[in-house]
Amino acid sequence: MDFQITGNPESLSNYEQDIIPEDLPAPTGKYKLKYQQYATEMKEGYKQYIQRIADKAKITSMQDTSRNKVNEKHDQEEEASVDDLVTLDRKALLQQGYADSPYHIRNSVRKSDAETVAAEKKKQTVVEQMMLDHLSRAVISDPEQGLNTEEQESSPVPPDPEGAPLRVRRRTLHETKIRTTSTLTVNDLAQKVEFDGRVLSRNGRDACRELIGFFFTHNQSLAVYEYRKFGKNRTNVLPFITKDTYSHQCGRRKGKPYRLGDFYTGATLTFLSCDHPSLPKSIKENTLFRLRITNIDQIALNSLKTAFDEHEEDTLSQEAQDWLVLQAIQADKLKEQLCKRGVRILTGLGKYFHHLDKAGSGLLEKADFQQALKVFNLQVSEQDFESSWLILQGNGHGKNKVDYGEFKRAIFGEMNEYRKSFVRKAFMKLDFNKTGIVSVIDIRKCYCAKKHPSVISGHSAEEEIKSSFLETLRDACSKSDEVSYGEFEDYYEGLSIEIADDEDFVSILRTPWGI
């Protein structure tokens, strides 16, 4: 049955207008401000997206031009050496497709804001625990507290017959004399630089520890705490390196105490394992352990550098020269050789070195590295190799051996700490038991290819993208059914080589892993 509306059209329009209440309150200034902020963010985000697309096009054209300049002889040698790698290389490069999708400004801003709030809350918890530890310890352990106890015992007030004598009671902060002449003050501990750090290790359990450190300028000491989370609500803050003055344990400044100029993003701090009995067993197995600074309070650092004008030493210029030598080696033909093959080469080298390292010490001899470069058809001149070897010799491992992780970082370089932080986030999401090893079954469950541009456009199936990822990742592993943190990191290290923009690389990790 058909229904027909009859009547005056003017009355109908009046009826529709009456549906909207007339007494709606006007929007408040708070919501107007939110809308203006949202509109501004969307406009700025769109401008950044357009600019990034243009920059990517320029970089791609420059890379294509530089590749065309490579001589024909080198091209023929490279093609002959990668004939058996082309298929898996192409499958690995499918992961770069996530960088081609539009960057979701609104979602990324929400995640960044939430991560910033969580990080600040975590740091505040660690700072409070650090202040409590050091101020309380300084007060309770002060010798003047004994004088305070003797005065209480000699007072005319009769002691409690049921209680123990004061000299054998358990001392608490509330039973102490708060002010002493030798105790620390809040002002002393406030003159500090705060930094985030990670242990340089291929052991996933150690590499993913959340460390927050402090360098105090009042006595040039440092302390490092570990922030641990159990479940959703339970957290704990424990000392990882106790507050004390420490010195460089390797390199050109071996034996010299740490100072303000040694702290910057990307710096590596070295310690003797025997000096820290409370360290985990996996770290104490090695004579030295290394701590990489991943982020630092730059404002506090600049302020303290202005207040404490330190004189640069000759060793700093020597280290700068060493860094320039390694940069020249990395920028030579190696980048061309790693083009399109970074995943296969870096994961293959990691697997090869792990096979040679029968003792599990992470150290290999000079001949092992030379042989590895030949096996993977990587052309490094003898002079460059000798230069890098002499630089790596100063790291305190001995005359004939070098850590192969350091060798890879020196020869091929490494992705920045911003990118590595997302690699660790992805692995920590997979490794919910914190064992440092993830099963391939769990990876398959967590990996999501629905938002891959090829899947969205219909050119590829979701299972095809997922299978390509698992196949290339499994090929890099020493065991077919599990993936270690070192192997996971090597995979994304190789994928990172050809991606110039940090946010594009972050998209490759955020989208499939949901971090």
Image: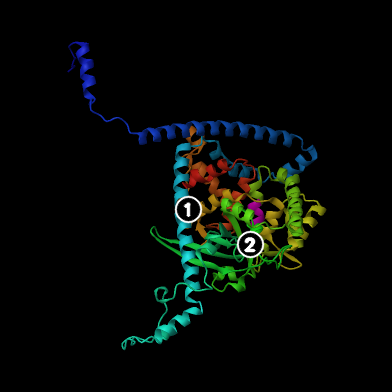
Q: Secondary structure at mark 1?
A: helix
Segment colored magenta: 346-350
| Image quarter in which the N terminus is found | top left
- Tell whether 393 sits left or right of 476: right
Q: Position of residue 70 (x, y in %)?
A: 77, 38
Q: Amino acid at mark 1?
A: Ala
- Tell whether 128 sits left or right of 383: left
Q: CA distance from mark 2 to mark 1?
A: 23 Å
Vertically, is 245 above or below 33?
A: below
Q: Amino acid at mark 2?
A: Leu
- Image quadrant assignment for residue 214: bottom right
Magenta stretch, main secondary structure, is: helix
- Tell whether 388 sits left or right of 139: right
Q: Position of residue 152 (x, y in %)?
A: 40, 83
Q: Secondary structure at mark 2?
A: strand
Q: Which residue is mark 1?
A: 119
**Residue 94 visible in the shown view:** no
Q: Which residue is mark 2?
A: 269
Membership of 471 in magenta stretch: no
